[in-house]
């Protein structure tokens, strides 16, 4: 189990007892402010605990949804546009306006870790919005995978998301021409 500093203090009873638990090996300090009850924990779990309000997006979300087999170099996290800058070198931060931030957030268990991630429908919109800023071969791979699973997606949700984003006409046109 991965714990924040405050959760670890509460579990042990005091800061002193937490320090003693770390020294004795019953609690493990993973990094500053992050503790766990087991020695080895996933990096994804640490990122999810460290940034609980952020949402996985971008190439990392495509990877976790099985839309690509390319393992991204960084964790792509969406945060509100007024959020503080994330200084973690493992993270690529994307600022999102409050009117579209919460669209499509789901909690998904991945390798025993519950993470906040945008659903496949939202990620299709993100793919079309960012197609010019991603490598062409990666874009084509993800697009082909979306074409194969389009019947399993909730089309009404895709249309709803597309209508809320800026440049909704461009997104809708790209959906019709490239995916459907």
Image (cartoon, rainbow, N blue to C red):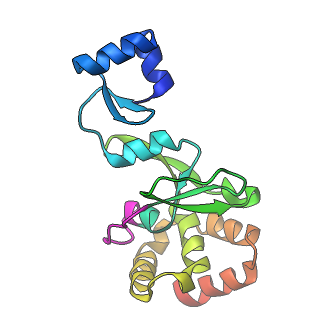
Can residue 71 be found in the magenta stretch?
Answer: yes
- Dominant SS of magenta comes to loop
Q: Is residue 4 above or below residue 45?
A: above
Q: Which of 158 and 12 is in front in this view?
A: 12
Q: Is residue 19 above or below residue 33?
A: above
Q: Residue at x 47, y 53 (%)?
A: 88
Res. 37 image quadrant: top left
Res. 168 image quadrant: bottom right
Q: Nearer the viewer, residue 40 or 157?
A: 40
Picture coordinates of residue 30 (x, y %)? 34, 36
Q: In this view, does 67 lie above or below 2?
A: below
Picture coordinates of residue 29 (x, y %)? 33, 30
Q: Residue at x 67, y 61 (%)?
A: 96
Specify the quadrant that holds the N terminus. top left
Can residue 82 be found in the magenta stretch?
Answer: no
Q: Which residue is drawn at 32% across and 67% down?
A: 71
Picture coordinates of residue 116 (x, y %)? 51, 48
Q: What stretch is highlighted in magenta?
A: 63-74
């Amino acid at each position: 189990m991965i714990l924040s500093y405050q959760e670890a203090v509460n579990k042990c009873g005091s800061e002193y007892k937490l320090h003693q638990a770390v020294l004795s090996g019953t609690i493990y300090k993973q990094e500053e402010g992050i503790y766990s009850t087991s020695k080895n924990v996933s990096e994804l779990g640490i990122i999810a605990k460290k940034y609980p309000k952020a949402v996985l997006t971008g190439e990392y979300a495509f990877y976790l949804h099985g839309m690509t087999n390319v393992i991204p170099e960084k964790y792509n996290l969406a945060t509100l546009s007024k959020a503080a800058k994330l200084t973690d070198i493992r993270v690529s931060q994307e600022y999102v306006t409050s009117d579209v931030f919460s669209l499509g957030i789901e909690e998904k268990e991945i390798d025993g870790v519950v993470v906040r991630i945008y659903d496949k429908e939202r990620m299709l919109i993100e793919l079309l919005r960012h197609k010019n800023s991603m490598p062409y071969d990666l874009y084509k791979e993800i697009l082909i995978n979306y074409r194969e699973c389009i019947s399993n997606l909730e089309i009404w949700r895709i249309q709803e998301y597309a209508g809320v984003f800026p440049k909704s006409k461009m997104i809708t046109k790209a959906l019709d021409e490239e995916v459907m």
